[in-house]
Image: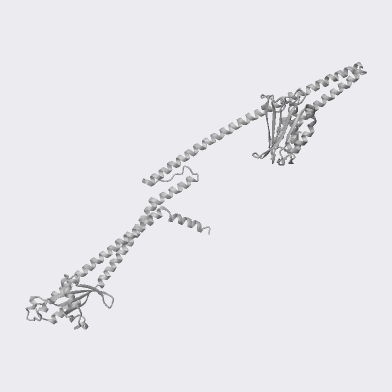
Amino acid sequence: MPETEPIRGRWARITHSLSAKLITLLLVSMVVIFALLGYLNIRLHRQHLEAATLASAGRVSDVIKRSTTYYMLRNDREGLYHTIQTMADEPGMAKVRIFDQKGRIGYSTDAKEVNQVIGNVPQDCYLCKQQANSNRFRIFRNPEGERVLRVITPIENQPSCSNAACHAHSSNQQILGVLDTNLSLATADVQLAESRNRTLAYTVAAMFLVAVLTWVFILRVVDEPITALTKGTRRLADGDLGYQIEVHSQDEVGDLARSFNEMSLQLRGANEEIIAWAKTLEDRVEEKTRELKSAHDHVLHVEKMASIGKMAAVVAHEINNPLAGILTYAKLLKKWVERDEMAGDKLKESAQCLDLIAAESRRCGDIVKNLLTFSRTAPINLQSTDLNSVVDRSIRLVRHQFEMTGIELQLEFADDLPLVQCDPAQVEQVLLALVMNAIDAMPRGGNLWIKTRVNPARDEIELEVRDDGIGISPEILPHIFEPFLTTKETGHGVGLGLAVSRSIMERHGGNIKVQSELGKGTTFTVMLPVDARIPAAADSPAETTNAR
């Protein structure tokens, strides 16, 4: 079966090729034309042969008639019969007989027929006389199956016959009898068959010779060039650009082959040009990529150094103040100890100094703790969480702050809020940072709105924290989520709360945005997807270890 399909495919390609169609068309046309010409030639030859045979038979019959006239005028039957018998013995003569107007056979080379009567003889004789001898000839087959030509020659009554001494007929009688000459057509049939066979053989040989010459011509002139073009087209389609076909003719097929060669060379040149351009472009892209990577690395290095410098400046500034206080009070206590002035009021002041030193030390510790919190990536513990419960728990932690600052709290919880996949502790940390910022923005009291709602278009839950405090200036607003940026007074924060909050939301696959206007308040909107997708690198062990 595996070998049958390729054979069938090749046979189908051969039978459906242009050469096969041309050869088939020419062969069919040639067979029809040669067959028609052969038939017409054989028919014409047969007609000529039959006409010649009829003419010869007529002449033979007339010769017999004229040869026997002498004996008939003298009523010499012996001489007449001898002459007829002599002529009947010639090759090709089948039978000769004479019968009168009544159809009685008076003489025949076949003795058995003598004195027998043949019907309708006068009518036949008068008919052949009236039609200028057109019906003198009859062709029939004898008992042996051979064709026989029958020539009927009427014997007319002439004056020389009617005035003779042997006169036996009236002068008014036109036909005295009939000479019936039968000639065998066996020889003519053999010659006709031989001629037909030769004509047929010549026709078949001519057809075969023309077919072979046509086949060779089509193969050389049509099939080979088309096969070469087909092979070249396939090689070109397979990527062998520049493939050339040998041109052997100056006709249209040769022009087509030359055009194919030119097209193949042009395609190869265009392909080489494209490859060169692609290689140049690839090299330039690689070069620009290296340049961009180098520039990017440089920018990252500069940004890193700037961040480190900024952080160092902020940390130094934040820690320097409490350290200066600690140093001042430590020197003061040392001075009192050296002077032995620790008794009485000095002892009480010494205790206050120690309290201040302890407070400033805790402040330094808080600054360092906040830095560690910002730099460390805590793992996320996802669980199905009711966001309304997280908001309620966070509010209870800072409710006393609202009472102390005179802030009115307005809560709007969505009833159809679905459970969300998140870390409730980290979400609570974000909410507390936003609430504490809002409290700091309203030192003389105000209103705080906390809302939860569903955004079905984005399949997420939104948590809104809005206050009517002092707002944020437009210059600071674009940088509000950057580390170490704060609007609070010195000693009340290092500007890491919003940066940490945005980091937590991004690790949850969410986001946080802000809108603010000076004198009218600020609105923070936290967007948390219902089905959180944590980035793969969010909790990598290497990052956590490095942060620690």
Residue 280 position by quadrant = top right
**Residue 375 at x, y = what percent?**
74, 31
Residue 501 position by quadrant = top right
**Residue 139 at x, y = what percent?**
24, 73
Q: How many marks?
A: 0
In this view, 336 is above or below 135: above
In this view, 259 is above or below 285: below
Q: Nearer the viewer, residue 101 or 107?
A: 101
**Residue 330 is at least partly visible in this image:** yes
Q: Residue furthest right?
A: 343
What is the quadrant of the C terminus in the image?
A: top right
In this view, 40 is above or below 323: below
Residue at image position (50%, 38%) is 272
**Residue 294 at x, y = what percent?**
63, 30
Q: Nearer the viewer, residue 100 or 207?
A: 100
Residue at image position (46%, 44%) is 243
**Residue 250 at x, y = what percent?**
36, 45
Q: Is 106 placed left or right of 340 in the picture?
A: left
**Residue 383 is at least partly visible in this image:** no
In this view, 26 is above or below 287: below
Q: Is 406 placed left or right of 282 in the picture?
A: right
Residue at image position (25%, 65%) is 45
Q: Is 2 placed left or right of 392 in the picture?
A: left
How are the colours assigned in the image? one colour
Q: Is 190 placed left or right of 158 in the picture?
A: right
Q: Nearer the viewer, residue 320 or 547?
A: 320
